[in-house]
Amino acid sequence: MDRAEVETRIRSLIAPFNKKGADIADATTFAGDLEFDSLTVMDFVAAIEDEFDIIISMNQQAEIENFGQLVDAVCKLSDK
Amino acid sequence: MTGDLFSKFDDIIALRQSLLAGGGEDPFSLVMEKVLSPTRAICNGRDTILLGTYNYMGMTFDPDVIQAGKDALDNYGAGTTGSRVLNGTYQGHKECEEALKEFYGMDHAMVFSTGYQANLGIISTVAGKGDYIVLDIDSHASIWDGCALGNAEVVPFKHNDIDAMEKRLKRIPEGAGKLVVLEGVYSMLGDIAPLKEMIAVAKANGAMVLVDEAHSMGFIGEHGRGVAEAQGVLEDVDFVIGTFSKSVGTVGGFCVSNHPKFEVLRLVCRPYVFTASLPPSVVATAATSIRKLMHGGEKRAHLWENSRTLHGGLKQLGFQLGTDAPQSAIIAVIMPDLQKGAAMWEALLKEGLYVNLARPPATPANMTLLRCSLCAEHSAEQVQTILGMFERAGKAVGII
Ligand SMILES: Cc1ncc(COP(=O)(O)O)c(C=O)c1O
C-alpha cells in the first residue's frame, strides 16, 4: 500500500472525530490541534486498527503526535 | 531563575479551589474522627453511616480478627523491618499464604504489602520485553501502573468488549507472549466482566490470563472466590490478584496461581523484594479474616439482599445508576456534572451519609459518580434510612 492511499483512508477515518472541521496536514497534532481526549484517542485508534488490521500499542502511540507520523507508522505497520 | 516544577498542577489547583469556593466541605479531605463499627463513624463531627468504604464483609471489627492481631502484636512485635526475601517472612506470613491457598484451592500464594503492589509486581514481571499485555481500557490504576513499570507492549480494548479483545489478540505477531488482564468487578460502575467468554477467547489465542478480583473476594461465587468462580472459569485463570483492603478488612495484597514455576516470582518481582513486608499483626488479622470468609455464606446472602434493595430503591427514586441491575456490592449513582455531584455529596454528608465521590480522570467516559459500596453488616433498616437520605438530598440539589 503506498503512502498516498494510506493517507486518504486515514483522512476519511478522522472525519467523524474532527468535530471542529480543522484542516489536516502532516503537522496537525492530535492532542493540540484536534483536541482529542483519551477516550477519542481510543476510539480513533481502534478505527484505524480495524481498517488496516494492525495493532498500534500504547508504546507506539506515545511516539505519534501528528498526522504525518501516524500515516508513516501505519505504512510501516501494514507493510509487515 | 529555576522553573517551578509544580506549574503543571495549576489546572488541578484551580479546579479544586473553584469547588471549594462554594463554601462546601472538601470531598477529598474528610477525617474519620471515630469509627464506631464497620458501618458507622463520626466524620467531621457528625454521626455518619458509611456507604463508601469497600468494607464489604464488615470484618474490620470482627472479634476473632481483632484478637488475632493483638496476639500477634504481643508475640511478634509491631513490624518486621525487612523484605519478604530477607528478614521479613514470619510464621504469620506463611500462615496467611496457607489461608489464601485454601481459600482459592490453588497451589501457590504470594502476599504483597498492598494490592497496588501485587498488580505492579506481577504484571511488570510476568510480561517482559517483546510480550503483549491486552487489557480492558477501564482497568484500575494499579494495573496501568504495572504496565508502565514493565517493558511489554500495551494494547487496551474497549470496556468488556469481547470482539475488540479478540481482534487485538489475533493481530499480535506470531511467537510473542500474551497476557490478558481483566477485572471481575469494575469498581467505578460496579459492573462485572463476561469472564467466561473472555477467558475462552484468551485461551483460544494462546494467552495467559490475570484477573483482579479485588471487589468480589469474599462475596461473589459460591465460596466467595470471585466472579471467575461464579462463572465457572476459575480453573482457567492463571493469576488471581486480590487485596486485603476490602472484604478482608485490613491491608495487603496477593496473587494466587497454579503455575508450576510460580515461586520464582519471589526472587524476580521487584515490588515484592524491595519493600518491607506487612506487620505481623496485619497478616494475623488477614489470615483469620480469610478463614472466616470461607464460611460467610449467610453474610453473603444478606449483602446481596442489601445490594438489591438499594439498587431498586434508588432506581425507583429516579436516580441514574451505573448498571441496570445490581451486579456487585457497588452501586454507582451517575451525577449530571462535577458541580452537582459535589453538591450532592455534601448534602448526603450533612444528612449523615458517607459515599465515595469519583470524578474524571479516574472515571469512565468522564462521568462524575457517587459510588456506594454496601456492607454485609448494614441492617435492612439502615438501607431504608439511606434511601430516605438520598431522596431528601437529591431533591434539595435538584437531581431528582
Ligand atoms: C481493582 C483494584 N485492584 C487493586 C486495588 C489496590 O488494592 P490496595 O488497596 O490493596 O492497594 C484496588 C483498590 O484500590 C482495586 O480497586
Image (cartoon, coloured by chain):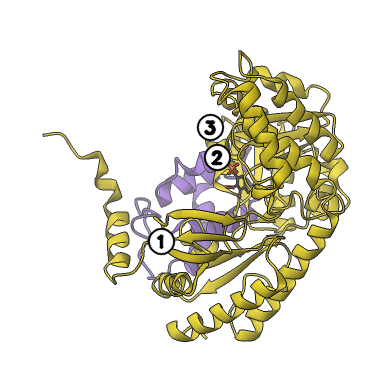
Chain colours: A purple, B yellow
- From this view, report whether residue B124 is shown above or below residue A27: above
Secondary structure type for disc 3: helix
Is A42 placed left or right of A69 in the picture?
right
Is B370 placed left or right of B12 in the picture?
right
| Residue B236 x %, y % | 85, 42
At x 60%, y 53%, the residue is B137
Q: Which amino acid does label 3 sit on?
A: Leu
Q: Identify the subunit bearing mark 2.
A: A
Q: Distance between the residues labelled 1 and 2?
A: 59 Å
Is B389 placed left or right of B201 in the picture?
left
Q: Name the residue under label 2.
A: A76
Q: Closer to the camera: disc 3 or disc 2?
A: 3
Kindly identify which numbered label has been placed on residue B105: none
Q: How far apart are marks 3 and 2 (CA)?
A: 27 Å
* Nearest the eye: B329 or B347: B347
Nearest to N terminus: mark 1 or mark 3: 1
At x 79%, y 21%, the residue is B261
Which residue is outermost to the left?
A: B1
Badge 1: residue crowd in 10 Å (few <14, some 14–19, many ≥20): some
| Residue B12 x %, y % | 32, 55
Kindly identify which numbered label has been placed on residue B149: 3
Is A38 placed left or right of B40 in the picture?
left
Q: Distance between the residues labelled 1 and 3?
A: 38 Å
Q: Closer to the camera: disc 1 or disc 2?
A: 1
Q: What residue type is labelled 2?
A: Lys
Q: Name the residue under label 1.
A: B44
Badge 2: residue crowd in 10 Å (few <14, some 14–19, many ≥20): few
Which residue is outermost to the top?
A: B86
Residue B278: image quadrant is top right
Looking at the rendered structure, whether the residues under marks 1 and 2 are on a common chain is answered as no
